[in-house]
Amino acid sequence: MTDGTPADRDRTPSERADVCVVGAGPAGALAAHRLAERGRDVVILEAGERFDFADRERRMERSIRPAHGPLSVWEMGGARDRFSSDGERFYPLNAARVKGVGGTTLHWQGMVMRLHESDFEAWPVDYADLRPYYAAAEKALGVAGADDNPYAPPREEPFPLPAFPPSHSDSIFAEACERLGVTMHSVPNARNSESYDGRSSCVGYGTCKPVCPSGAKYSADHHVEKAESEGARVVTRAPVQRLEHDGAGERVTAAVYATPDGRTHRQEAREFVLAAGGVEIPRLLLLSKSEQFPDGLANSSGAVGRYFMDHLFAGTGGTLDRETRQNHVGFLTSECHQFYDDPTRGTEGSAGGIPAWSKESGEPRPDSIKLEFLNYAGPSPVEMALTGDEFGDDLLDTLREGYGNAIAMGGLVGQRPRKENRIELDPSTTDDHGNPVPKIHWRLDARTKSSLRRANEIQRAILDELGVNISWTVGPENTGPAFHHMGTTRMGTDPAESVVNPRLRTHDLENLSIASSSVFRTSGALNPTLTIAALSLKAADHVDERL
């Protein structure tokens, strides 16, 4: 692990700060930049390091070479990143998070959709409230897209960049979907389809997750640097240990952070913004308990850490007797929201179509479903060679026969907020500073499982129409998380059951705001980053108003 740039090595507190932002991922970066460009003195405290952009090709090579573990790509693991999981399902927290400047956008897939209007029915804000912030977020991230989704919420502004053309495997799906009456449309991507904002267009490395060597895929270090150019200061390798408040318990006075030399410091500020994600934010609040807040800071409702939600993956795949060019593109170019607001609908088609969901099934009515047309399914040649028993010409023949004809569909379904799904502290396990680690209690309810089965049913109908020899399915029994951490500091108007108000400020402390998917009331079934970005800009505006 490096010690950062010379500027990063000064880890003493700033004497004056209007705003202290905790976390340098997309939420923290966008909020910090918004405030800094308005003349506010901003300090960002980041637990991880600043990664050198020049190292990205090396990290890409590390990600594709089997000798290196996946956590090593972005320096995750060890005592700093310990966690525990207790419940019906093990939650592999470290598998998809990064601590460092840029956060998880350093290795994310880059899909950025606006939540549907129906998703906000249980929120204290609606789509109209976020609509201008969505547009600003798309501009900031450089979203490539097309207004071709008939099921998407209304928009007035064009996407900043043109959409990527459909992949080869998308064209294979297209005829079967047309026969079945299934609508395919483009995927909004936070990657450059042409040069934008000082970054090059995508050059097709195909390793978007976990590394984009060209920088065409958006990562939040871009806005951290923009914030710095406006005068913001970044303190790296400075994990915040706790937040302190005044004697009245009305305002946060300081963020106490540790540094590699074993010292701790207090960063004072007029306003504080937590932007460290849906697991570390509730953990920090719980670690900051005090006499006035014996159950954790900002937790008079008891909701801190509760209502943890994620998206679950549903998938079905197999092989075709034609070339599919798998792994040719490292990101999705087509998807389907047709079953999002009404997952029970059926379609008519040449093979009987997709059956409508039946109440006679005895299962709960499924929730929203997003379908994805995967263009990188199946084992890679490297994996096939390493796991096989053949050599020489025999291996070459197997690779030629077994690679290039895989095809699959994926999808996401969401969880409803349930109090028993939660993040709490585990005092039996501590991190490198002796603090209890986050413990994740996570289970799937019957409705989520019903949604996964429904997604699989639709996927099988499309693949059957296509003539795919189906060989695998990921459904309720073997699903996994999308690592979208939502709901743990939920938004609401009632302080007795929520943590932040519609202006993203905590009910309990008048100068503490939260910019994160942790404030989500519901999960929907769409990747959350664009909504995180929109909420972060909204939070920054409200902080600016108070200063």
Image (cartoon, helix red, strand yellow):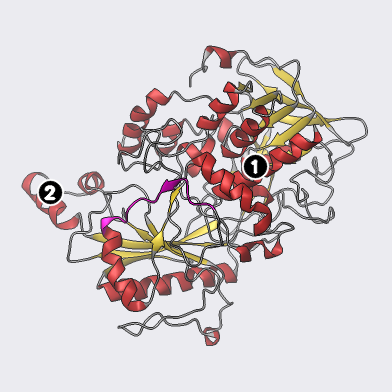
Q: Which residues are magenta?
A: 157-168
**Measured from the top left, where is residue 192 in percent x and y?**
40, 41
> Which residue is rendered at x = 69% and y = 50% of the image?
519
Q: Nearest the camera: 276 or 110?
A: 110
- Which percent across, then down, holds residue 21? 68, 31
In front: label 1 or label 2: 1
Q: Quick one: 30 or 9, which is closer to the camera?
A: 30
Q: Amino acid at mark 2?
A: Leu
Residue tagged 1: 536
> Label 1: how many residues lie within 10 Å, few (<14), some (14-19) or many (20+)?
many
Left or right of 409, for residue 513 = right
- Magenta span dominant secondary structure: loop
Query: Can residue 225 be spotted in the picture?
Result: yes
Is 159 inside the magenta-drawn segment? yes
In the foreground, 339 or 495: 339
Q: Which residue is mark 2?
A: 395
